[in-house]
Amino acid sequence: MRKYGFWILFILIIVGFSDSVFLTYEYDTLSSVGCPVSPLINCLAVTSSKYSQIAGMPLALLGMFYYVFLFFLLMKKNKLFTSLLLVTTLFGVLFSSYLIYVQAFLIGLFCLYCLLSALVSFLIFGFSFWFFRKESKTLILDLGGYFYKYIAKPILFLIDPEVAHINMVLLGEKIFKNKVVVAIFRKIHVKKFPRLRQKIKDINFSTPIGLAAGFDYEGRLTQVLPYIGFGFGTVGTVTNGSYEGNPKPRLGRLPKSASLMVNKGFKSLGAGIISERLSKLKFGYPVGISIGRTNSKILKTVDSSIVDIVSAFKTFEKNKINSSYYELNISCPNLIHGSVSFYPLANLKKLLLATDKLRLKKPIFIKMPIDQTNRHTKNMLAEICKHKIAGVILGNLQTNTKDKSVHKDERKKYKVGKLSGKPTQKRSNELIKLAYKNYGDKLTIIGCGGVFSVEDAWAKFESGATLVQLITGMIFEGPQLISQINEGLNEMFVRKGFKNIAEVIGSNVD
Ligand SMILES: Cc1cc2nc3c(=O)[nH]c(=O)nc-3n(C[C@H](O)[C@H](O)[C@H](O)COP(=O)(O)O)c2cc1C
């Protein structure tokens, strides 16, 4: 049936054009040939009413131009013209709806040929979106992006960042309880991309783009994120004990640097509450739990911090969450209580020996810092390889807020916190390459830091990442970014002649 789509549209345009020619003739001659008169139908009353023209131009004549324009767009087979065709048919439907309203409520009479014109508009709209369904999905994503960039983001960026974050999460959680919303988003965003599919550590990832730890830290969005295109998502970081967060400001924006200032310091409801919440849920995609050390004055030593972390793991295990993997976050740069660090190799070893003893079935990925030297990062990776660890996430926030990756006007904007987004990108990619070159055969690498586009994600795969995570890109570009990256990756595979992700991973590492 689809192969006839072009001809169906072509015939509808001819019918619509002929109808407009006829209505223009009726308007000019004040006739109503072929139009029966009844209490509801009177063509002349409609075509001679004050609503039948705009600024002296008969609507029927405008209709003729409309169909000629559609014909021209239909003949030009490229992305821009197809998008224009889809947008034009949308306007056609909206205008036809207005004209039906005018006939029904303002004139109180209908014109049969005007109704035919409306019917043709609706059919052209429906068939266009059906015939060009691939292009229409891209168009919907692009329009979503423009809406976010020019309307939603300017409004959201007027609000305090933490208030905006909390409310967007609560709104998402609430509206995705509605089945119609889920169905609409599923239709637009959930698509099978065989080239993007991977099985890693026995977990099936439908796409390699995931949500990084820190956005859904209370586990409220696991029923939302699969429907905006994410292939996996991390809840947390969750800590064993609860913590109300560092003193404000905890979150800030650096628009010129495409970055966020983060100073939450593991704000968490605690493992008990979060695991309880998640224990009731089934997940439509792989969910990970990020675990870190409670930001508490009581935890003064490495040993007590390890006991705290192990307790959090045990709580999640006890509650039998349907999650697929764990992240062990050793790199939060904002823990203001206690000065325990797992960067010294002896401390790292102690921690990993403790997690080994848990004998977890789910794989653990270590969330790594990006501010350590290459040499020390290599030493840490060497230690990690000796344990029951599936891989590493490279990496966390940029701690050098004076780095030249931060726009000079914004280097002194905040006295507290560390930076996400673009300032993390370069170092993250360098470390992914380093890890891939030295331990690519032992560790799965998840690339994280400064992904704002399909090219950014591609660079991470080429550097050696198997999966990619992001947060800041979504906040700056809009939630449609995830599907745009998925679509873009898929197209890139075809264009560059790669069959699947495995062929791309590490292809830029010498
Ligand atoms: C608001 C915010 C909160 C974050 N909180 C955490 C966290 O709790 N645990 C963690 O491992 N990383 C956290 N991060 C770091 C991110 O997971 C990620 O490593 C970093 O932001 C770089 O990715 P991006 O540029 O895509 O945002 C946070 C980042 C942001 C923006």
Image: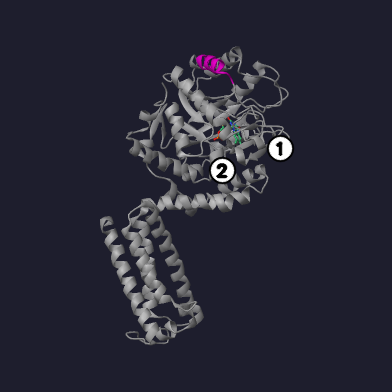
The span picked out in magenta is 372-383
Residue 468 at x, y percent in the picture: 48, 33
Q: Please tell me how many numbered marks the rendered image carries.
A: 2
Would you place residue 51 above or below residue 236 in this image?
below
Q: Which residue matches tag 2?
A: 476
Majority SS type along the magenta span: helix
Is residue 357 at all visible to an observer of this figure?
no
Residue at image location 66% in from the left, 42% down from the top:
162
N-term mark: 2 or 1? 1
In terms of image quarters, where does ligand 1 lie? top right
Would you place residue 146 above or below residue 464 in this image?
below
Q: Amino acid at mark 2?
A: Phe
Side of 247 where 469 appears, left or right: left
Is residue 475 at all visible to an observer of this figure?
yes
Q: Quadrant of residue 441?
A: top left
In the rendered image, the quadrant that contains the N terminus is: bottom left
Q: Quadrant of residue 420?
A: top right
Q: How is the image coloured?
A: one colour
In this view, the residue farthest toward the top is 346
Q: Which residue matches tag 1?
A: 249
Q: What kind of element bears circle 2? A: helix
In three-dimensional space, the C-alpha distance between marks 2 and 1, rounded to whole angstroms, equals 19 Å
Residue 103 at x, y percent in the picture: 46, 79
Number of residues whose C-alpha sits closer than 10 Å to that of mark 1, classed few (under 14), some (14–19) or many (20 or more):
some
Number of residues whose C-alpha sits closer than 10 Å to that of mark 2, classed few (under 14), some (14–19) or many (20 or more):
many
- Towards the viewer: 286 or 430: 430
Side of 6 where 504 appears, left or right: right
Side of 80 where 247 appears, left or right: right
Residue 154 at x, y percent in the picture: 61, 50
Would you place residue 439 above or below residue 250 in this image?
above
Instruction: Please tell me whether residue 312 belongs to the stretch shown in magenta.
Output: no
